[in-house]
Image: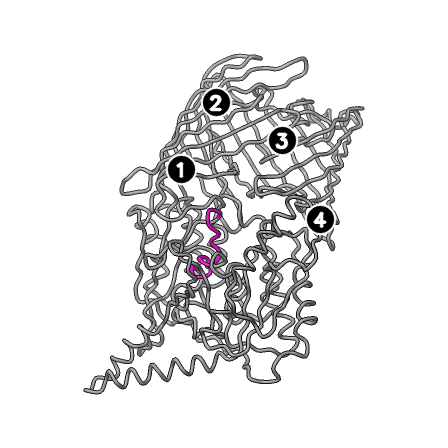
């Protein structure tokens, strides 16, 4: 059974306002009937884009092929990835424009959790997993904030222009989700366009569901992954459908994972309603591209969709009957009011403050989207959904109310990650936090990190005053124990104390800022113990979970006074470029500390495996200079995960004074050849490195780098 959310009740009420005489109800019913019949007639040509995860990116190629053959659908119906691609097309983007949007996205990074500032130094770390306790909607394991933000940035303006009526988009549109309670398909025809698309792609247990008018909605694929029936119900008389899930007629791979995946796809196909398309397009997608893993270069998917249309649809499409997309309606002129809907009063007040410049005010898309980003930057929300509602014509033009629906993160949650490398061994970090009820968002947290060289624990309180948001303030206490590798053995440096700081994470550009005042009791195995206090300031580009070449820029300054006094500065920069499928980068990393700095502050050539062939902490000095280049190329035929082969070249020196850098013997050259795979849980890396000191080593890393 198909549920349809309709614009009819709202249209009926509007008509009643006009029809005030005794025959008002009859006239209203007559007009409504005419409008519905006209809607059916106008939808005589349709395109249906099915679900399929990353394989659904091929739909962009299908649209390009249909345009090439002159097919102009009035109605677009999509589910899951088909809803994402279809909504862009329905919003007025040409197939070429849709493809440019697809290429502009970093698809693997879409599903990465927001990095968290942790510990006394407020360093950013990427969680692998986030578990919320007491969530009020169907939960998911994969981070959703990036895809939520992207959908709003791409679709908010189109939704505002249409007034939330998907029949008033340049092409009529239906986003197909499923009711989690009954499993029935739900065709969404009105409301927040971005949120309707998000509901359609909420794979149960993977992405959090969307609650709409009290109904928990999830991925439409569990009801009908190829919703041809929805297009027929909307009056479509000629339908072209794109199916990216249907397996090939012949069994291509007899391995257990391939057989299981084929069985799942066949099960989904066999549950389709008995409704056929007039033309069925079946893109021939490379079998190594599964639904769950997004390639960094989706061009093969586009080509598969384009070639499939040329093969399956040429000569079979109607010669006429369609119509070009309508021009988008004009933007609203004014946002007359602001209404924030949030389950948490403190976060609602914060959102009210951040959106106050957007409404009431003249309509400004950039201002609304800027406020969306500022709210995400607090780390307090999973979803921010602005929409323009109650759009009406007035003497001053088109005016409506800005409604912002806010989905806070779980009040109590646990985040963390684990990793392993064959130099330092296993490592783990975690943070448990709870949001305290107050007038301002307060987050109380306990965090810790455990590894062979670094161990620390911290208790913190993070405050988000509305007046300074998204800048947050933190205060905390900590204890750290660092095993520092030095020539001849290891030195244990312990730090116990507290901090007071301010921190800011920007979404675009991806930057992080932290300014921290620390006071610690330092116990050092290589010198005098005592109190150390002073500021630490850091600004850096946010590192992606898996970086192929280069490094994010960073500038870090630290100064300490007291019994243990020292200064330290680190500057890092990189220039990255691409040539075809090759990725290139040149980088420089300079760190310098004063002569009386503790061992855990002095830099080493082996830290972060900067110079190939060296262990972490090897060749430590007061000043370190490293420069080099990276070059990488995708592995031509990955079996399961998209991978790359990478060559790292480095030259570096670590010395006690500047004059030592003039001695060529202080410098070491190194090279490493590595295989790298990007996974949702962090990089998997293996390689061999060697240097001019005559040292070489095999190195392996699994998981986020920390």
On residue 145, which mark appears? none
- Residue 706 colored magenta? no
**Does 395 sit left or right of 413 as displayed?**
left
Mark 4 or mark 2: name the one nearer the start of the chain. 2
Image quarter of residue 70: bottom right
Mark 4 or mark 1: name the one nearer the start of the chain. 1
**In the structure shown, which secondary structural element does the residue marked by tag 3 occupy?**
strand
Callout 4 touching callout 1 (CB < 8 Å): no
Residue at image mark 1: 413
Residue at image mark 4: 583
For the point 69% across and 54% down, which residue is it?
251
- In front: label 3 or label 2: 3
Mark 3 or mark 2: name the one nearer the start of the chain. 2
Up/down of 706 relative to 207, above or below: above
Residue at image mark 2: 561
Residue at image mark 3: 591
Determine the CA span between mark 4 and mark 1: 37 Å
Instruction: Give how far across and how far down residue 640 sits, in percent.
Output: 67, 45
**In the structure shown, which secondary structural element does the residue marked by tag 1 occupy?**
strand
* Image quarter (top left, top right, bottom left or bottom right) of the N terminus: bottom left
């Amino acid at each position: 059974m198909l549920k349809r959310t309709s614009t009819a009740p709202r249209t009926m009420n509007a008509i009643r306002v006009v029809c005030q005489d005794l025959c008002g109800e009859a006239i209203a019913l007559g007009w409504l009937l005419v409008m519905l019949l006209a809607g059916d007639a106008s939808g005589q040509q349709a395109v249906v884009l099915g679900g399929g995860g990353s394989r659904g990116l091929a739909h962009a190629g299908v649209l390009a092929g249909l345009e090439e053959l002159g097919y102009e659908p009035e109605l677009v119906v999509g589910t899951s990835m088909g809803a994402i691609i279809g909504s862009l097309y329905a919003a007025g983007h040409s197939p070429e424009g849709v493809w440019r949007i697809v290429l502009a996205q970093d698809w693997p990074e879409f599903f990465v959790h927001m990095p968290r500032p942790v510990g006394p130094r407020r360093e950013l770390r990427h969680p692998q997993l986030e578990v919320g306790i007491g969530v009020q909607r169907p939960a998911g394991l994969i981070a959703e904030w990036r895809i939520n933000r992207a959908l709003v940035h791409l679709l908010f303006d189109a939704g505002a222009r249409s007034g939330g009526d998907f029949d008033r988009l340049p092409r009529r549109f239906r986003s197909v989700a499923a009711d989690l309670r009954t499993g029935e398909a739900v065709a969404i025809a009105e409301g927040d366009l971005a949120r309707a698309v998000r509901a359609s792609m909420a794979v149960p247990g993977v992405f959090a569901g969307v609650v709409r008018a009290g109904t928990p909605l999830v991925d439409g694929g569990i009801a009908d992954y190829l919703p041809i029936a929805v297009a027929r119900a909307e009056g479509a008389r000629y339908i072209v459908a794109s199916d990216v899930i249907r397996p090939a007629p012949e069994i291509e791979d007899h391995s257990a994972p391939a057989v299981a995946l084929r069985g799942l796809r066949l099960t989904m196909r066999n549950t389709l309603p008995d409704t056929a398309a007039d033309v069925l397009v079946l893109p021939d997608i490379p079998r190594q591209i599964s639904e769950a893993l997004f390639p960094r270069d989706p061009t093969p998917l586009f080509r598969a969709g384009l070639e499939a249309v040329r093969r399956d649809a040429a000569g079979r499409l109607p010669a006429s009957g369609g119509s070009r997309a309508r021009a988008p309606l004009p933007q609203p002129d004014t946002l007359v009011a602001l209404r924030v809907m949030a389950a948490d009063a403190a976060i609602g007040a914060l959102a009210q403050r951040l959106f106050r410049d957007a409404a009431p005010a003249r309509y400004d898309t950039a201002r609304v989207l800027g406020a969306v980003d500022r709210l995400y930057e607090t780390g307090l929300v999973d979803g921010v959904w602005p929409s323009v509602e109650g759009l009406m014509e007035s003497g001053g033009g088109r005016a409506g109310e800005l409604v912002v629906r806010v989905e806070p993160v779980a009040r109590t949650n646990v985040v963390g990650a684990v990793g392993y490398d064959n130099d330092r061994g296993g490592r783990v970090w975690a943070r448990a936090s709870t949001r305290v009820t107050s007038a301002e968002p307060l987050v109380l947290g306990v965090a810790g990190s455990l590894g062979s060289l670094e161990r620390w624990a911290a208790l913190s309180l993070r405050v988000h005053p509305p007046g300074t948001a998204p800048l947050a303030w933190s205060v905390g206490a900590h204890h750290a124990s660092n095993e520092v590798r030095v020539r001849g053995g290891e030195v244990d440096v312990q730090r116990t104390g507290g901090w007071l700081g301010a921190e800011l994470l920007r979404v675009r550009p991806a930057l992080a800022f932290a300014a921290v005042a620390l006071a610690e009791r330092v116990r050092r195995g290589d010198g005098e113990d005592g109190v150390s206090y002073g500021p630490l300031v850091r600004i850096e580009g946010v590192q992606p979970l898996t970086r192929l070449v280069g490094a994010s820029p960073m500038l870090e300054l630290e100064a300490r006074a007291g019994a243990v006094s020292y200064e330290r500065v680190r500057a890092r920069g990189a220039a990255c470029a691409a040539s075809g499928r090759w990725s290139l980068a040149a980088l420089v990393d300079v760190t310098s500390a004063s002569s009386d700095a503790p061992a855990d502050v002095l830099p080493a050539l082996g830290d972060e495996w900067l110079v190939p062939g060296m262990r972490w902490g090897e060749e430590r000095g007061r000043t370190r200079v490293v420069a080099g280049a990276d070059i990488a190329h995708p592995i031509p035929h990955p079996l399961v995960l998209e991978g790359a082969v990478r060559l790292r070249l480095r030259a570096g020196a670590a010395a006690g004074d500047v004059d030592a850098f003039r001695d060529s013997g202080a410098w070491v050259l190194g090279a490493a050849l590595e295989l790298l795979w990007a996974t949702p849980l962090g990089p998997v890396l293996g390689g061999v490195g060697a240097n001019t000191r005559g040292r070489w080593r095999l190195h392996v890393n699994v998981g986020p780098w920390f």
